[in-house]
Amino acid sequence: MKKNADNKSILVVDDEENLRHMLHVMLQKQGYHVELAVEGAEALRMAAQKDYDFILCDIKMPVLDGVGFLKGANAAGIKSTVIMMSAYGTVDSAIECMKLGAYDYISKPFKSDEIGLVLRKAEERERLKAENKRLKEEINREFSFANIVSKNERMHEIFNLVQKVCDYKTTVLILGESGTGKELIARALHYNSRRKNATFVAINCAAIPENLLESELFGHMKGAFTDASSDKAGLFEQANGGTLFLDEIGEMPLALQVKLLRVLQDEEIRVVGGTVTKKIDVRVISATSKHLEQEIAAERFREDLYFRLNVFSLTLPPLRERQEDIPLLAAHFIEKYGRKMAKHVACYTPEALKLLMDYSWPGNVRELENCIERGLVLCEGEALDVECLPEKLRSMDGRGRGAGMAFDGFSIKRAEESLERALIRKALDETGGNRTHAARLLEISHRALLYKIKEYGME
Ligand SMILES: Nc1ncnc2c1ncn2[C@@H]1O[C@H](COP(=O)(O)OP(=O)(O)OP(=O)(O)O)[C@@H](O)[C@H]1O
């Protein structure tokens, strides 16, 4: 017979000598390393000393039967996968064993193929469990603080706050322009908390049509509306025990804001079309790039919900206010995409860095990440160079020409900032970094220049 068990260990527990012998021979042929016990108490002693992959255990035995063995195994924290063998008349006990944590049961008498099949199913489950564990660890690593890059003081204050608040159920509101890392911080809050083994569910409130958002969040009963052909659990239920991230909360329709407030206060949901309420334990993190105070003034956002969400708020600075992060983030993304594309790009050239530093990044870290990913596709050398960067960055030649073009949006304030930054850099270049002379060239006071250098993080 083909060996497929890869020398996995198995403990056979049965008081019938013939069956023990038959299983021993058969399982050994299939490649298992087999050991034997005659009843539950002996099996418990053996399993306490050695981690068997599987335990094949009879239900009816003298001294300690299968049910007693399972109870003892649970109490001793034995993690082996247990498969029960039930004889005629012990099916009820077999079901009790499943409730106690046995993986499956097989009815006696059985054919060798049957036992092989159950064991292979159990092996597949073990493989999936291990894979799941590995993926969870990978996710935990991905959203650990080590992967959130910054040396900016304000960002470090935020990391400290995240660490302080992550284990509490306190609702957190994350503010900041698009692409500043709000979702990344929300995930860090979840994956560094006691909730990390439960689900993190994210929803973008702006991306779901208004009429579907309620059922998406709270679930619906079959027939609640025309398309509700079956019961469906909502995101709150999926995130039970974990975290629900409500992105673009500023886009939530007013009618739904009332319902969300009630859920946050009562910690229970009512599914659409249902009559009963369900208790839920969900930590809610919300985020927006809008000014919610302005939304409240315009009567588009409820003040009471704002106070409920804003128990603890974190404001992420835009990338243009933490320029010192640009080289770090660029190196981080070069490493990340270099690895993904299997390309050995070590770093960036000084000229490329200058362009990255001069640009105002209206799309913040996301825009920088996209720019580096695109750059790596084009890059043929050891270092990311100017020609791999998008035209909009290159059109700023460091002499201030086209500086306004570095800004993609419509905000006059941001365009002015972008132009000011480029002119300051140009003046500093021209004067070899002499701030007094640069201020003179710029026709502003020395004090004003120092203030602007600090404000734009150009030190
Ligand atoms: N400090 C950082 N270190 C490493 N990667 C970052 C950092 N900040 C943001 N990123 C990356 O930038 C991208 C955008 O971040 P994220 O989606 O969290 O932004 P956001 O503020 O939620 O954007 P939006 O408001 O548009 O949803 C992501 O791929 C994220 O991993």
Image (cartoon, helix red, strand yellow):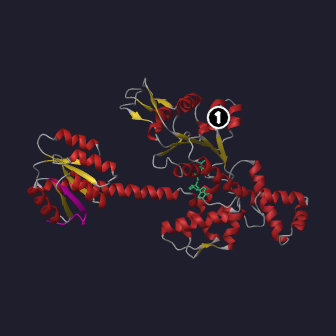
Q: Is residue 209 magenta?
A: no
Considering the image in quadrants, where does the N terminus appear? bottom left
Q: Position of residue 403 (x, y in %)?
A: 75, 60
Whether residue 96 appears in this view of the structure is yes
Q: Nearer the viewer, residue 85 or 143?
A: 85
Q: Horizontal placement of 402 versus 128: left or right? A: right
Question: Does the residue tagged 1 have its C-beta within 8 Å of any atom of ligand 1?
Answer: no
Q: Is residue 11 magenta?
A: yes
Vertical relation: 232 (above or below) 111: above
Residue corresponding to mark 1: 306
Considering the image in quadrants, where does the C terminus appear? bottom right
Q: Position of residue 181 (x, y in %)?
A: 61, 52
Whether residue 50 appears in this view of the structure is no
- Displayed quadrant of residue 127: bottom left
Where disc 1 sits, the SS reads helix
Q: Quadrant of ligand 1?
A: bottom right
Q: Nearer the viewer, residue 41 or 55?
A: 41
Q: Which stretch is magenta?
A: 1-14
Give the residue drawn at x 40%, y 56%. 133
Give the residue drawn at x 50%, y 32%. 214
Among all residues in the image, which is located at the extreme front? 63
Give the residue drawn at x 29%, y 43%. 100
In terms of secondary structure, what is the magenta stretch mainly?
Answer: loop
Amino acid beneath label 1? Tyr
